Structure formats: structure tokens, C-alpha cells
Amino acid sequence: MALPKQVKIVEVGPRDGLQNEKEFVPTATKIELINRLSAAGFRNVEAASFVSPKWVPQMADGADVMAGIERRAGTIYSVLTPNLRGFEGALAARADEIVIFGAASEAFSQKNINCSIAESIERFAPVAAAAKEHKLRIRGSVSCALGCPYQGEVPVASVVDVVERFAALGCDEIDIADTIGVGTPKRTREVFEAVTQVFPREHLSGHFHDTYGQALANIYAALLEGVEIFHASVAGLGGCPYAKGATGNVATEDVLYLMNGLGIETGIDLAQVVDIGDFISNAIGRANVSRAGKALLAKARSEANTCV
């Protein structure tokens, strides 16, 4: 299959990237991050999470963040909503899209929320129904699609089953997520080949973590399967509590550098994103793990120092 001519990059740094930061990131910093990302050309930004502050204290200011951002026309601002209470918060905050989630691993589901995969997804039925009633987009995220920290290998059939369950809830888009970053290109192609049989290829997305350094290779593998939507996190923000030392989400700068090299249109300004990665890394005192980002920053600074 030929590579896509253009792809959509969903920027997940403000939510998925920041949620595990131990020190609270000021609301104003989160707002500036989202505004700068929107200005760089992202058509979809995962902005906040409406979950209990008890479980994710970093996301306690979701309503304030959504109230403070400068909304760019044509940009989808997504929020995570685990239940009806979260949905009500998302609705009040004028979110464009809600995100619901379920694991493809029975062991992960039982260990984390003490119920089966089927039971966990069925809990989202009233949330999905409410979203449809209010004409909000719904995105379903399938975690542990390429491996589980508890059971190891996850059968492809299990991923397909979860995709079908999300489709039945009316999801507009479904993420195939390598939550702990153990996937490889061969497995990535197998999974996407299978799930495209039960859900439209153009509405599937790849969400890869770079724990084992395979994220870009997996993205290329997904491109070969015709996938046109990918998630990334500026400066590689994020981490996984189930994989010690994990670098977290694949860095947006690295993904954009890859896409530019392949001649695939994203509509996003890489130079701006490099600056944004530098901004947020400095703002929260965290190392920038984007290889392309750091290289381009070093090049820009070297050129600036040699100019007369």
C-alpha cells in the first residue's frame, strides 16, 4: 500500500504528557502550551482530563484550562472523560471531543479497575449516549494493544474485540495504543491489518510510546497499512508508571521530522514545535527527549552564534 499523502497528528502533550508530572504545572503554563500548539497548526489537541483530582491531581484544573485557552477555528480540543460526571464537566467546558478508554488486556483491566474488558467498556455506554445526544465527537482509546505489563503478549483478537465494542458505542475515531512501548513493526502491521477489517482505516489512529525505541519504526509500519492519524507529545512529554524508565509518548518533533522526510503533509510548522518543546521543557524543569528537537535547537543556536 502506498504511503498516505497527508496525516493528522494529534498532540497529546497537554494531557497525556503532563498528567504524570509530580510537581503541579501552573494552569497558565498549560494554557500557553495549548495556545502555542494550536498556533503551530495542530488540528487536534488533547487538552485536559475531567477525572477525580484524587486520582490525577495534575489534571484538577481542567475546567480552568479549557476556559482560558484561545480557541482556534477548525481545531478539535479533546478531553478525557471516565464517567458521566466527567462528561458533564467536559460539556460545560465546551470540549469538542471526549475520550473514553479500555484495555485490550484482561489482566490489565482486572488489575487496574477490577473488572473485565467487556464490563469496563459497557460502563461508557451512558457517556457515549450523552455525547451523541449533545453532538460531541467520541474517541475510543485501546490501551495495551501491543503488549501488557502483566500478561505480556496480547492476542490480536482481543484488540479487534475492543475495537468492535467501541465501534458499537458510536466512536468516531479509535486509537490503537502501545501503552508500554513494547510493540515492534511486525506486530504493529498485524494488529492494524486486523482492526481495519472491522473499523474504517481512515478513522483509526496509532498511539505509540518509545520505551524500547520502536515508536518511529512502528509509525512507519502503520503508515504502510494506510493509517493516517498519529498521536505524539511535544518534547516527548509523558511516561508510563508500568514501565520504569520509560520515555513515554513519541516526541512530536521526531514524528514531524519523519513525515517531512517522507513528503507527507501535516499542516504543522516543525520549527514552531521545536520552540514549543524547548519552552515546556524549561517551564517544568524536565529534559527534552526529542532527538530531532534537540538537534534542530542546537543547529539553530550554532547558526545564531556564527552569524555576523
Image: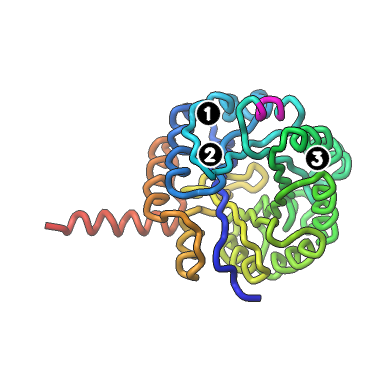
* Side of 121 where 308 appears, left or right: left
Label 2, secondary structure: give it: helix
* Side of 291 where 227 appears, left or right: right
In the rendered structure, which disc, 1 or 2, sits on the residue that comes first in sequence?
2
Q: Residue 90, image x and y in percent? A: 66, 29
The part of the image, by quadrant, that contains residue 276 is top left
What is the three-letter code of the residue carrying label 1?
Val
Q: Residue at x 43, y 48 (%)?
A: 40
Q: Residue at x 79, y 51 (%)?
A: 104
Which residue ends up furthest to the left in the rendered image?
Answer: 308
Q: Quadrant of the N terminus?
A: bottom right
What is the three-letter code of the residue carrying label 2?
Pro
Q: Quadrant of the C terminus?
A: bottom left
Please tell me the numbered disc located at residue 14: 2
In the rendered structure, which disc, 3 or 2, sits on the residue that comes first in sequence?
2
- Mark 1 closeness class: few <14, some 14–19, many ≥20 residues within 10 Å: many
Query: Are the two marked residues, 1 and 2, in contact with CB atoms closer than 8 angstroms?
Result: yes
The part of the image, by quadrant, that contains residue 269 is bottom left
Q: Residue at x 57, y 29 (%)?
A: 58
Q: Residue 155, image x and y in percent? A: 82, 60
Q: Which residues are magenta?
A: 87-91
Closer mark to the observer between disc 1 and disc 3: 1
Label 1, secondary structure: give it: helix
Q: Which residue is mark 1?
A: 65
Is residue 274 positioned above or below 131 on the image? below
In the rendered structure, which disc, 1 or 3, sits on the residue that comes first in sequence?
1
